[in-house]
Amino acid sequence: MPAFGSFALLLALALSGYNLFAGAIALRQLATGARGRVSPERLAETARRAGIGSFFAVTCAAFALVWAAFTNDFSVSYILHHSNRALPGPYKFAALWSGQEGSLLLWAWLLAAYGFVLRVRHKVDVKLTAYASTILAGIQIFFLLLLNFAAPPFSLVAGRIPQDGFGLNPLLQYPEMVIHPPMLYLGYVGFSVPFAFALGALMMRYPGEKWIHITRRWTMVTWLFLTCGIFLGAHWAYSVLGWGGYWGWDPVENASLMPWLTGTAFLHSVMMQEKRGMMKSWNVWLIFSTFALSILGTLLTRSGLVSSVHAFAESAIGAWFWTFLVIVLAVCLFTFILQRDHLKSEHKLESLVSRESSFLFNNLVLLAACFTVLWGTLFPVISEYVQGNKVTVGAPFYNRVAVPIGLFLLFLTGIGPILAWRSTSFKSVRKNFILPVVSAVVTAIVLIACGVRPWQNWSEGQGSLYSLMAWSLGALVVTAVGSEFLRGAGVISRHTGQNLFASMIQLTRRNTRRYGGYIVHFGVVVIFIGLAGSAFNQSTEQELNFKQSMKMGPYRLVCQDYSQDSNLNYDTEYAILDVYRGDKKITQLAPEKRFYQASQTTSTIVANHSTLAWDLYVIYAGKNPDTGQPIIKVFLNPLVAWIWIGVLIVIAGTFVALTPNMTAAFAASRSRVPVGETPAMAMSKGGD
Amino acid sequence: MRLLFRFSQLGLVVLLAIFTMGSADNAVRYNDLGHKMMCVCGCGQILIECNHLGCPDSDRELSELRAALSHGDGDTTILESFQAKYGPTVLAAPMLTKFNLVAWFVPPVVLLIGIVATIALVRKWKLRTVEMPAVPTTTAFQAARERIRKETEF
């Protein structure tokens, strides 16, 4: 099987090489009108087929590695180091992306899969797809070169083959780890597609904005995958790392956040290009930057450039990534300089108080946030270069610098939807803003009355001030978005006689992109509400003997038992705790500490009782060596569940935005039109 | 105008006074300083959040922190003494000294420059905008325009 996998990777490289060179020659011939022995159309078609072939070859290689994991083929060095006989099946599958070589293979396979879909659907726009396919082949070649020569996944073990493997990193032996990395990679890799289309469109001086229409769904799906990947990672960190938090501003976490921020900016600013033919250069550079940041993220994770708790796959392939990054940026810059006259805006901004302007500021703030994260991530390296010593740039830095930027962004989320395109009159601003602003002020007053008073515990940090601001701004956004929904639904309701809820659904179906976007914004507010709760986290630690209890907030935890167990994969120590609220038993929790025999490492399994108000988060911190009694650490983390609910709303909103609009005719036929009014008339009055 | 300026100044002073008030007992300072330092065992975790079973360093660091607090040392003195003992990486964020100031000030400055540049750009574009010819003001035209706006708006 290793030989089969290695051969498949070599074949994939050859096919991708053909795709790139034959595709480039064909496109050159088409551009210049030159003819060779084979017509450029046929040459381009063979290049496309080679690209499809490379997908099957990379799939074979990925299958070979998974097969080796499932059959415990420890002659393969990668399997020896990332699996063992006792490892459960799903984690053997996850071994594919748990190390350097495997995760590069996953990158290559996902890229090949995206390329496969793109090449199969080439009839959408044959020429533009040919350009995009050729560019994707160039990216694919880089990863296949890595897999064939720098980080081969099928390297064989020298000498005697051990009977068992060293096992999978225990931190990765958690159900979410089977899905989190593929989601994240689908996001990283997915941005290659809009990047390839943007670069291709620029190279061929593609007329109009059709390339944006073609890539809109690609970009949104990719963004959705990245969003899911990031939050699954946060949930995994919360459930496994056992420090009571979900985001530590670790360089690897930052690496995933940066392309997400620029990708989000791109999703907003392309609307200006579609609608008004503006910001063409900006959009092209946004998608170039997003792709470059995906590569930079991968580079940071693997090169050891910055130290990270996640960087379990460090190696010396940094030079390869640097070279690739420089080539990508050089190609982008060269193409941009050559074709920049093609990117002239058709319109200019006419007012500072307009929808376009809010998009511009939204982009600016998202990019400032991205820059802050990049700056904080790279500052230790810069400091070492300038001062001769490394410094740590951790959570306190980001809490002070990035959180205010995030709050500003939340504010823009609220005001953007209530501004009109081109220009908004002062009268309109006053009319549309008054309710959201009142809502924000009332929320702030209520919260202060309820005890959220930043000035009373200022010495603890700005957390409660930020929370107060986040919740007040959240109220502003929800009111703004809600009033937009209600206004539109009210019009439909008046003209069709439907109830408000049915009208809202119809309104959303008429313009799924707009109202799906609003649902996403609502989800973002819910996430912010959850994040703001972290300012009020509480924790305590206590040694607990049988029947002893400890208090945390309204809960009382009583130790019923503590014991140990073992299976083939790991030994475990755990405590069984009854949780009471008042005199009523709420639940039973069993926090664990596992010791994995193959890798000789420990891992925490957190026990969590989650409610809308707070999470009771319990960790088994180990046994006191002197008394032999378990040490239990308990956190009361307010509003964490809102984060995960917010993510679900964001996902739902994105799905709505991906759904095609209901056509006006269909909408009219579904509406009960009042007597004396034609369906067309009713449609023209309703909606936005 | 002068009165408004005076009131703004007074408001600023009151705000500063409010935000610098508040208790700072040792438990709060312990929690605060514990979040400003890192565990030096290599786990990359915030000192007070380090949850390694048998971590060789976090307990020692925390007991040193407790000792410094009970000794009555100021926050800056404690942070500097930890930095002197364990190196600059023990601090979770750079202190406001020399080159480290750059870390703190560059992102807000970049955002500020961006905002100013964007406003300037929009104003420049606005000035360049060519006046559109006056549109007919008939009711039918206005109705058609409104309908188009509604149908095409995102």
Image (cartoon, coloured by chain):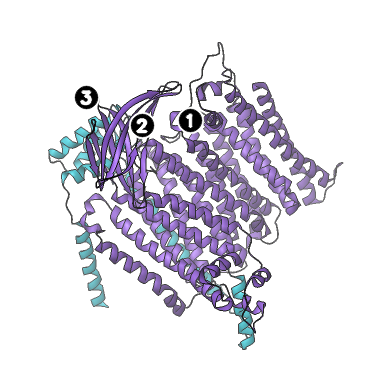
Q: Quadrant of residue A182?
A: top right
The one of A127 and B55 positioned closer to us in this rendering: B55
Q: Is residue A595 left or right of residue A1?
A: left
Q: Is B18 drawn above or below residue A463 in the view shown? A: below
The one of B67 and A480 positioned closer to us in this rendering: A480
Tell me the tag on residue B131.
Answer: none
Q: Residue at x 20, y 46 (%)?
A: B28
- Specify whether residue A562 is in view: yes
Task: State how far apart marks 3 and 1 are (Cα).
Answer: 40 Å
Q: Which chain is cyan?
A: B
Q: Quadrant of the N terminus of chain A?
A: top right
User: What amino acid type should be assigned to the residue bearing mark 3?
Assistant: Thr
Residue at which label 3 appears: A627
SS at badge 2: strand
Q: Mark 3 or 1 closer to N-term?
A: 1
The one of A101 and A602 positioned closer to us in this rendering: A602
Q: Is residue A222 left or right of residue A608?
A: right
User: What amino acid type should be assigned to the residue bearing mark 2?
Assistant: Glu
Tell me the tag on residue A314.
Answer: 1
Q: Quadrant of the C terminus of chain A?
A: bottom right
SS at badge 1: loop
Question: Which of the two marks, 3 or 1, is nearer to us in this view?
Answer: 3
The one of A386 and A296 positioned closer to us in this rendering: A296
Q: Which chain is purple?
A: A
Q: Mark 3 or 2 closer to N-term?
A: 2
User: What amino acid type should be assigned to the residue bearing mark 1?
Assistant: Glu
SS at badge 3: loop
Residue farthest toward the left in the current orientation of the protein = B71
Tell me the tag on residue A592.
Answer: 2
Q: State yes or no: discs 3 and 1 in contact (Cβ < 8 Å).
A: no
Q: Mark 1 or 2 closer to N-term?
A: 1
